[in-house]
Amino acid sequence: MRSLLCFVLLLSFRGLTAQFGPPVIVFDSLTGSVDFELGDMDGDGDTDVVTGSAADSLLVCFLNNGQGLFLDSVHISHLPIYDGPGTIINELILMDLDQDGDQDIIQCLVEQGDVHWYMNDGTGHFGPRTPLLTIGIWTVFGDTADLDADGLTDITLWTIGQIAWLRNTGANGFALEIQPYQNALRNTTVDVDGDGVATLST
């Protein structure tokens, strides 16, 4: 079954409904798209789409031409559909890991919890898959925030009954801390008390 990703905007305010044009099809060529992220990947000021395919084990960036059309695609990586545990894409995160001003891609693979990243050169082209660390457990959802107020962006990953905190140590390195949260459905990070420091919520 092919995946169809499109954007539909609906707005309702005090009984008034704004009308929009038809949905814009971004792609219909991937099988089993499991996640997508939005960001300006090529530095041209518009929003591009990064998505991963579970069945095809593809990671692809669709570049916006500035008019809401996604005519160009950048094939970032291709993993075997199944080459042992942990080779199927499950979660994608965009963040400026190397602090050069553009959005890099963090890729989480299911089952073994392998976390990799792809360096963006600023034009929407990416370097080879580079390992960050292995969590060793199934990963489901992810988020980013500076949880320890050190000026570096950390990563949190929800796993089955656990929260994994990937504490950014600088120089593209992370230290792993795992906490049990038996009833957590997913995690997010937000400054809940207005002190300027993000808090992990489940």
Image (cartoon, rainbow, N blue to C red):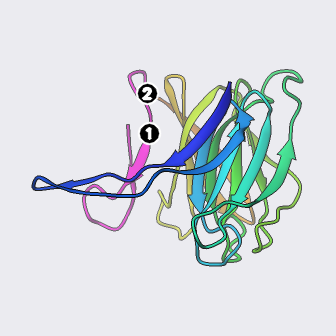
Tag shown at residue 135: none
The correct choice, above or below, for 201 with respect to 119 in the image is above
- SS category of the residue bearing label 1: loop
Q: Are marks 2 and 1 in contact (CB under 8 Å)?
A: yes
Foreground of the two, 153 or 88? 88
How many residues crowd around disc 2 within 10 Å: few (fewer than 14), some, or many (20 or more)?
some
The correct choice, above or below, for 188 with respect to 55 in the image is below
- SS category of the residue bearing label 2: loop
**Rendered location of residue 197, percent (x, y):** 38, 63
Which residue sits at x=58%, y=72%? 46
Q: Amino acid at mark 2?
A: Tyr
Foreground of the two, 32 or 186? 32
Foreground of the two, 25 or 189? 25
Which residue sits at x=37%, y=58%? 20
- Image quarter (top left, top right, bottom left or bottom right) of the C terminus: top left
**Rendered location of residue 10, percent (x, y):** 32, 51
Q: Which residue is mark 1?
A: 187
Total of numbered circles in the picture? 2
How many residues crowd around disc 1 within 10 Å: few (fewer than 14), some, or many (20 or more)?
some
Which residue sits at x=66%, y=66%? 103
Horizontal relation, residue 6 to residue 111: left or right: left
Indicate yes or no whether the magenta region holds residue 185. Answer: yes
Sequence-wise, which precedes: disc 2 or disc 1?
A: 2
Q: CA distance from mark 2 to mark 1?
A: 10 Å
Residue 81: name its quadrant. Answer: top right
The correct choice, above or below, for 172 with respect to 28 in the image is below
Tag shown at residue 181: 2
**Rendered location of residue 135, percent (x, y):** 69, 34
Q: Main secondary structure of the magenta part?
A: loop
Q: Amino acid at mark 1?
A: Asn
Which portion, as a residue range, is magenta?
181-202
